[in-house]
Image: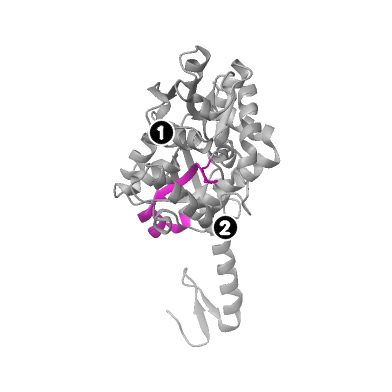
């Protein structure tokens, strides 16, 4: 209800026109005060579930620091980090809509897309492969594995990693006898049941060196494979298209977490340990010392997804039979961290 020369308040009080500006200014200030509650961050906060690729270890330190240090809240998303019951759970829950993000091995991402699953990598956790062949001290080089038993987990990419490493050293991959040992590389090598085993050098490799001094470590990117991001933060194309702000917020928070890890590794390790009480601090620090150099290796910033690197990876992926054809890089990766 308005009359000429006056303004009416919600309480029905008529104010002279000259006081209109003062009244509206006070009302606006009150609205700002109400909406500004909660620390001055007016970004809408959204819960988002993130599944890890494996049991928590040092490669995940930046994710736990992002949560412990409040970087997720600051970016407008609250991350709920969960460890998987199996290495395949992250992808399953992502596709079922029960997780918003999952850390996937890049080979699992490629295979999922080959099967028609529209999942998309949005942030690189590391810039280099973590896959390797670990070998007994007496194995001087990969080619020397010919005629010997080498353990593989049974994951499709293992055969490709083994073949690439042996072939890259001038050996014959067909001359290597493979046996499936699951995720028991350390026990199998310490027990002498195999001469070598495919494994991640940042976890099993670190553990094995502590148990069996002199063990050899043959990393796949030192024997023919390109530098590719082994672990990738992944979401669905639908989430990327319809909830781009959530994807940006989660990626930015995680990137800040890893920047903190690189700045203060001991505190970041503690963030990880406090959320996962069964972890051994000495083991975590040894793993973090090993893996930290590849968090940003060759990248201009943490999380970068280099198109040039990804194209080289895609060609290698098909060449060694992980996928039937080179993965479509443009379709497989998206978001603000894709570049060059």
Residue at 56% from the left image edge and 49% from the top image edge: 303
Question: Which numbered disc covers residue 36?
Answer: 2
Image quadrant holding the N terminus, namely bottom left
Q: Nearer the viewer, residue 172 or 138?
A: 172
Residue at 50% from the left image edge and 35% from the top image edge: 165
Where is residue 316 drawn, in percent x and y?
45, 47
Q: Does the image show residue 281? A: yes
Q: Does the image show residue 82? A: no
What is the residue that sits farthest to the bottom in this orientation? 4
Residue at 39% from the left image edge and 41% from the top image edge: 108
Say if 325 sits above or below 336 in the image. above
How many C-alpha atoms fall within 10 Å of the one at disc 2: few (<14), some, or many (≥20)?
A: few
Where is residue 285 drawn, in percent x and y?
65, 28
Determine whether the residue tagged by mark 2 lies in a helix, strand or loop: loop
Residue 116 among magenta residues:
no
Q: Nearer the viewer, residue 213 or 137?
A: 137
Where is residue 213 drawn, in percent x and y?
63, 17
Say if 298 sits above or below 207 in the image. below
Question: Image check: 287 left or right of 50?
Answer: right
Nearest to viewer (mark 2 / mark 1)? 1
What is the residue that sits farthest to the top in this orientation? 191
Q: What residue span does the magenta drawing correspond to?
A: 224-246
The residue that mark 1 highlights is 159
Question: Which numbered disc covers residue 281?
Answer: none
Determine whether the residue tagged by mark 1 lies in a helix, strand or loop: helix
């Amino acid at each position: 209800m308005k009359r000429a020369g006056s303004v009416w308040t919600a309480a029905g009080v008529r104010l002279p026109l000259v006081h209109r500006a003062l009244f509206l200014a006070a009302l606006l200030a009150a609205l700002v005060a109400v909406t500004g509650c909660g620390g001055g961050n007016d970004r809408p906060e959204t819960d988002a579930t993130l599944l890890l690729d494996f049991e928590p270890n040092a490669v995940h330190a930046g994710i736990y620091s992002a949560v412990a240090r409040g970087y997720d809240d600051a970016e407008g998303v609250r991350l709920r980090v969960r460890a998987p019951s199996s290495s395949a759970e992250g992808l399953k829950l992502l596709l079922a809509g029960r997780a918003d993000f999952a850390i996937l091995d890049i080979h699992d991402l490629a295979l999922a897309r080959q099967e028609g699953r529209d999942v998309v990598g949005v942030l690189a956790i590391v810039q280099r492969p973590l896959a390797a062949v670990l070998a007994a001290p007496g194995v001087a080089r990969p080619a020397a594995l010919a005629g010997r038993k080498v353990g593989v987990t049974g994951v499709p990419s293992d055969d490709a990693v083994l073949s690439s490493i042996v072939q890259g050293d001038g050996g014959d991959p067909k001359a290597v006898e493979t046996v499936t040992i699951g995720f028991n590389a350390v026990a199998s090598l310490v027990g002498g049941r195999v001469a070598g085993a495919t494994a991640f050098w940042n976890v099993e490799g670190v553990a094995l060196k502590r148990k069996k001094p002199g063990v050899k470590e043959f990393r796949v990117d030192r024997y023919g494979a390109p530098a590719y991001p082994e672990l990738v933060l992944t979401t669905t194309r639908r989430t990327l298209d319809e909830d781009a702000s959530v994807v940006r917020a989660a990626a930015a928070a995680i990137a800040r977490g890893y920047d903190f890890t690189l700045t203060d590794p001991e505190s970041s390790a503690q963030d990880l340990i406090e959320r996962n009480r069964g972890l051994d601090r000495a083991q975590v620090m040894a793993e973090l010392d090993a893996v930290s150099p590849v968090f940003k290796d060759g990248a201009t910033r943490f999380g970068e997804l280099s198109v040039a690197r990804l194209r080289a990876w895609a060609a290698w992926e098909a060449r060694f039979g992980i996928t039937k054809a080179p993965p479509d890089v443009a379709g497989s990766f998206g978001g603000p961290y894709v570049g060059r």
